[in-house]
Amino acid sequence: MSSMDPMQTKTIAVVGLGYIGLPTAALLASRGVTVQGVDVAAHVVETISRGQVHIVEPDLDGLVQKVVSSGNLAASTGMQPADVFIIAVPTPLGDDLKPDTAYVEAAARDVAAVLEPGNLVILESTVPVGTTERIAGQLRGHRPDLRFPGSDTETPDVHIAYCPERVLPGRVLTELLHNDRCIGGMTPECAARACEVYRLFLEAECFETTARTAEMVKLTENAYRDVNIAFANELSMICDTLDIDVWKMIELANRHPRVDILQPGPGVGGHCIAIDPWFIVHSAPDQAKLIRAAREINEAKPGFVLEKVSRAIHGNANASIACLGLAFKPNVDDLRNSPALGIVEALGREHGANIIAVEPYIDAAPDCLTQHGVRFADAQSAIAQSEIVLLLVDHRQFHAIERGDLAAKTVIDTRGLWRVDAG
Ligand SMILES: NC(=O)c1ccc[n+]([C@@H]2O[C@H](COP(=O)([O-])OP(=O)(O)OC[C@H]3O[C@@H](n4cnc5c(N)ncnc54)[C@H](O)[C@@H]3O)[C@@H](O)[C@H]2O)c1
């Protein structure tokens, strides 16, 4: 698939060596490119320099070990000149639900210091629309000696593009190779040059567009998921009021050839779907009504679950509650922004040691639970000790729980795992 000669792109600097940057750097290095990995965190750089990894991702350890020992990937805390710069630093949500682009700005400042004519700068971080243009302006401010796309009418010295990432944690290396890419250039030439970089490893298609469109594409993908989950979550609350089994109802509605409703749950977590829609709301607050409402519905769902628990506790203040699952989705150990963890933390704050947390993918309860006295156990013993069983995550281990073990319990099943007619 490669059209660009890796020898021509002599050096690529990947700035930010986390879940996105490190796999990207390692894949490029595995294609014969000399890759400089840059990260502000010394422990990240030290770990990678030893040929090891600081994040859990299938097959990444072997690949990093190989490319570091071959000399194609070297990590450093300092920025060096390169031909291409790929920026993959965090873009969290600020306290006031405003996107925080400070890490991107800091990375751009470091890149600006070493830029040379002929360079290409690619932004991969998830950002609000207009950020790539703003970063171009920032680079222009730092380097008045160079011409940048945007306001300079002549051919720019430095090309700039936005290329979002749409990989699924746990499948990052596979999806980096096989997912189509949407590449937004500040100019068509910028997009074409960025495509050449991705074609060094991509086994899928590159679609070229403008930087603003590509920024919105990324945000739209996650808002689409959020809105659809919110629809399912809203249905679950409506059905609860109307005494209808929401899972059965959705299963039947989905028999319609053009209906495909997702499954409800205790809320939405993780570091993308629960955050990125706010970037759209912040940019167009008067227009983004549905996207904002979806966020609010999904954020309200943990409170709805807590209400159900408090009704179940009613009259038995000493009831023990087995809480099954803390992760933000099934079959992973990732607790970031997890609604399940938030629910168990709220229960722990009120009921302390009556709460027993179960999470097969971690070894011990996190501090936010232990500080309230929440206990940690395996599913079987937690259920045996409890009057109430709250299922929060449908990890594969929980599918094996015997229905008989739940017979005398009050069960609150937020994932529809144990509904009467479930397979
Ligand atoms: N993780 C995902 O699944 C995923 C998927 C799609 C998009 N994204 C987006 O990609 C971007 C990166 O996410 P991630 O999950 O890789 O983040 P991460 O936190 O795993 O890694 C980011 C790395 O950047 C480093 N860093 C911070 N500031 C820096 C600077 N100024 N210079 C150099 N390094 C710096 C940090 O030390 C960290 O190691 C974010 O915008 C995120 O929203 C992530």
Image (cartoon, helix red, strand yellow):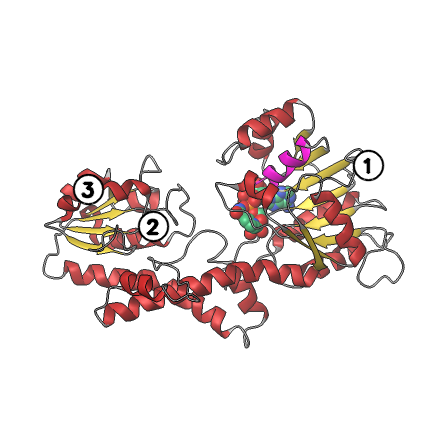
The residue depicted at 18 percent of the width and 38 percent of the height is 381
Q: Say whether mark 1 is within 8 Å of ligand 1.
A: no
Q: Give the prevailing secondary structure in the magenta stretch.
A: helix
Q: Residues within 10 Å of mark 3 (few under 14, many from 20)?
A: many
137 over 32 or under it: above or below:
below
Q: Which residue is mark 2?
A: 341
For discs 2 and 3, the disc positioned in front in the rendered view: 3
Residue to which mark 1 is pinned: 8
Q: CA distance from mark 2 to mark 1?
A: 49 Å
Mark before the other along the chain sequence, 2 or 3? 2
Q: Which residues are magenta?
A: 17-30
Mark in the foreground, 3 or 1: 1
Kind of residue at badge 2: Leu
Name the residue beneath numbered marker 3: 382
Q: Residues within 10 Å of mark 2 (few under 14, many from 20)?
A: many
Where, by quadrant of the figure, is residue 153 drawn? bottom right
What percent of the width, then of the height, locates residue 194? Answer: 74, 49
Query: Where is residue 25 shown, x and y percent of the image?
Result: 64, 37
Circle 2 sits in a helix, a strand or a loop, which is it?
A: helix
Density class for disc 1 (Cα within 10 Å; few <14, some 14-19, many ≥20) is: few
The question of residue 27 being in magenta is answered with: yes
Locate residue 397: give its quadrant. top left
Secondary structure, mark 3, is: helix
Q: Residue furthest bottom?
A: 286
Image side of residue 25 versus residue 150, left or right? left
| For residue 262, side relative to residue 236 (left or right) | right
Quote the CA–CA distance across marks 3 and 1.
60 Å
